[in-house]
Image (spheres, rainbow, N blue to C red):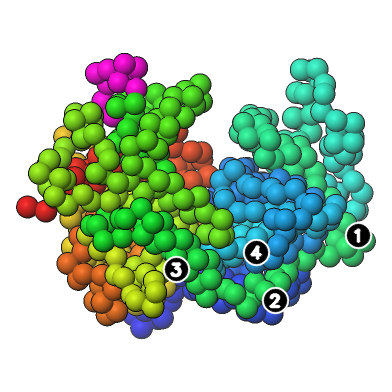
Amino acid sequence: MENKFLELTRAQESRAAIEKLYIEMRHLFNRGFYKPAGISGREVSKALLTLRPEIYGSINDPAKVELEGLVYVIDRLPKGIEECRYIKLVSEEGYYSSEFDTIIPPKRKRNCYRIDKEQMFMEITRGRSEIYDILTHLTFLFIEADKIKRRAADEKGRETREWKKLSEIITNGFDADDTSREVAFTYLSTILGRTFEETKYAHNRLEDNRQSNNGLFHVVYWLGKIALDEEREEKDREISFTSALRERIGHHIYGEIWAWNIKQLLAEKGLLNRPIHIISANLHSVLNSLFAYSALKDVFKEKKLDEIAAELSRPQNKALMEEIEEYADQHGMYVLHDHTGTNITVQIFDTAKIDIKTLHPDIQYDESYLKDAKPVIFVMDYAFGEQAYEVMDELLKPYNFNEENHHLNVASIAIMGKAGILTGEKGDLMIPNAHVFEGTADNYPFENDCKKADFAGNGLNVYEGAMITVLGTSLQNRDVLSYFKNSSWDAIGLEMEGAHYQKAIQAASQIRKNISKDVVLRYAYYASDNPLITGSTLASGSLGMVGVKPTYLITIQFLNQILKGRK
């Protein structure tokens, strides 16, 4: 019996692997550089393989290249990353004003610069979470590159026929007839250790974002080539970090400037002393909920708001979105695009300038309250991981003007976001009553003004309970998540920002007295994936139209609670 308690469970092994990964990555960051094939790089790879994250699927299978994970990672790294032996993480160091082209990955807002044929710079302005995210994705790429390398040569070190054919395809270009393409897919599937069908599917997924990547054939070839060159010609791959980045990380340099610009705008528009309702969300749902119906009443007529949103999400209706934005600009919306490095754009809505009689019938309000209070709705785009603490902490600090502190009159803070769900399916809703910070003893229970009953009768499953704030979504595996779900934590989902937001809010309201201790809190998430179900991880693809309904249900609930005031 004693031995039983001394044996580590898979969940404990996985949690230890997560901790080791972060310790190793922090050590490498402080050191300033590392080589993936070196001792430190191999330790990071070993920890990731021990962890076996769900999002990276078959990463532990030496015979198969993990394709869904590969597509997921390529969408989040800059175009051409597969060709680079040298990757440097930099702070904002003036490259935006250089002659280098700015490369922005489609699924991650960060500036990247291709310095030469072998070197890529990636600009970090969102804190440690962004660094860990990039290093984890790069480690995955290196592991898969080594698999490709092993399948590119036989046991005597000679290049295989399939690898030679892939080299010819890349050298000669991929403009071939349908028959030649089928042959090419056959060569590629052999190198990848995947079926013909799986290979074509991954190829097509990358083709959908072709402007932001080089395509599956190119990516696979260059990952394998760089790995082969390292082994045969000792051309080592290297990851490094600039001294400026290492000095600035952990300080609120970008968040402080961002928050100052916002408060300056509020002061200029005479909104600083009004009740302010902060919403962390996307930049379309509040805008559309308030103005789409008013701006395009003849177009949408009797449609519900989520139906209007579905129409507006179609690429062919981009002109309609421009009409809505133009209408909103004339009725109290101010937009502050970020140029400080946070990549968090802000929308400010002065409700005193909104013609409430033209609002969509789904939006409820108290006319006398709005007339008296004239609340301001402040929408900020999503933060990333640890960055949530930085921006919320700086935002809630008083505005110092003419050597006087002016405290913001923050009436409520609402957080909406996508999250992984542990019981349920994509599109379902999660209403948290606490945020539990993975890997620490930090737990943040709170009174949520949103309740499960608020979303009843809408055709979606709604779950209430604790949310886990994880160090990185790409580091979660079935064992750790099952522990949080099935133990007394009784967790309903996972995300990356909740505990960081709540930490800043509680410090501002209960310790630093920057905002009222009675500030109203609203948290609601919709499920982007279920990492416990095979084929339902983030790597399986985007939510698409499934996310429209829950997004607008949450948005409408937030707005109704704000516009009706506290009874």
Residue ID at (54%, 63%): 126
Residue at mark 3: 390
Task: Find the distance from the CA under tag 2 to the CA under tag 1.
Answer: 32 Å
Q: Which mark is residue 232?
A: 1
Q: Is residue 176 left or right of residue 50?
A: right
Task: Find the distance from the CA under tag 2 to the CA under tag 3.
Answer: 21 Å
Q: Is residue 248 magenta?
A: no
| Magenta-colored span | 296-305
Whether tag 4 and tag 3 are in contact, CB under 8 A, the answer is: no
- Looking at the image, residue 74 lies above or below residue 184: below
Q: Secondary structure at mark 2?
A: helix
Residue ID at (29%, 70%): 407
Whether tag 2 and tag 1 are in contact, CB under 8 A, the answer is: no
Q: Secondary structure at mark 4?
A: loop
Residue at mark 2: 243
The mark nearer the N terminus, 1 or 3, is 1
The mark nearer the N terminus, 2 or 1, is 1
Task: Find the distance from the CA under tag 2 to the CA under tag 4.
Answer: 12 Å
Quadrant of residue 519 within the rendered picture: bottom left
Q: Residue 424: percent from the left, percent from the top?
A: 31, 44
Residue ID at (18%, 55%): 449
Q: Amino acid at mark 4?
A: Glu
Q: Secondary structure at mark 3?
A: helix
